[in-house]
Image (spheres, rainbow, N blue to C red):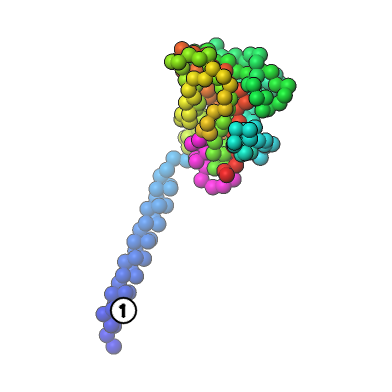
Amino acid sequence: MAERPDRADHSLMHKRLRTVFIAASLAVVALAAGAPSASAGVLVASAPDCSPQPTSQPFARFGDSGLYQLAPGGAFESGSPSWSLSGGASVVSGNETYQVHGATDSRSLRLPAGASATSPVMCVGIEHPTVRLFAKNNSALVSTLSVEVIFETSLGLKASAPIGVLLPSGQWKPSPRLLVLANLLPLLPGEHTPVQFRVTSVGLGTWWVDDFYVDPRCH
């Protein structure tokens, strides 16, 4: 008996779809085989333990009840991990006025015009969406504070991306939430990307920075 036209059409379409699926699968395999393999660079090599760290609510009085962890050396107190300083940056006496990290804290980071400071390496993942910090400047109008994240590419090379710019303020103020774009690099929950953070005084003024925190949880 001859095959009905509708069944024949269905069978032909099924064969075509199967052919397209196989071809697409082969193309994906070929692309994966030809892609450059990941290469561990200096950030990965120096990355610390990426397990969860202690958290607190340093910005609760400002209406932000999120849990944050202090970035390595982010309080700039003696005995804490050191940030890399350049352009005349230094750790000086004088803490941010809210004392969110501790009532006995007494130091902060000073950034004259053009100076920058880079944090030690820490891990972020898709559960680390934002950072916040305290900053002030000497009221110079032509001055901003640039905040960047430094991350590692699949080739093991360092790259950086701006995540925020703070405007002049003559008094200590908490920054807005700054989105850590590099936290989107890991593809699956539980994977982490080693990063550093860099703050730079741009323009003519001097900036002070203190208590640099990372939000370890997406709310």
Residue at point 59% right, 36% down?
63
Q: What's the residue at 28%, 78% (across, down)? A: 6
Q: Quadrant of the N terminus?
A: bottom left
Compared to residue 10, the image places residue 129 above or below, namely above
Q: Which of the two residues, 170 or 131, is positioned nearer the viewer here?
A: 170
In the image, the segment drawn in magenta is 179-192
x then y, percent, for residue 141 = 45, 15
Question: Residue at the bottom extreme?
Answer: 1
In the image, taking residue 185 as reference, residue 70 lies left or right, namely right
Nearer to me, 18 or 178? 178
Q: Nearer the viewer, residue 178 or 51?
A: 178
**Residue at the far right in the pictured view:** 104
Residue 30 x/y as whole percent: 39, 50
Which residue does the image show at 68% across and 20% down from the upper left? Answer: 77
Residue tagged by mark 1?
7
Q: Is residue 72 magenta?
A: no
Q: Name which residue lies at 54% across and 42% down.
A: 126
At label 1, counting other C-alpha atoms closer than 10 Å, the crowd grade (few under 14, some 14-19, many 20 or more) is few
**Is residue 149 among the parts visible in the rendering?**
yes
Image quadrant assignment for residue 23 = bottom left
Q: Quadrant of residue 79?
A: top right
Question: Which amino acid is tagged 1?
Answer: Arg
**Residue 119 image point, x, y percent:** 58, 25
Secondary structure of the residue carrying tag 1 is helix
x, y percentage for residue 76? Answer: 65, 21
Q: Quadrant of the C terminus?
A: top right
Q: Is residue 195 among what the camera can see?
A: no
Does residue 185 belong to the magenta stretch?
Answer: yes
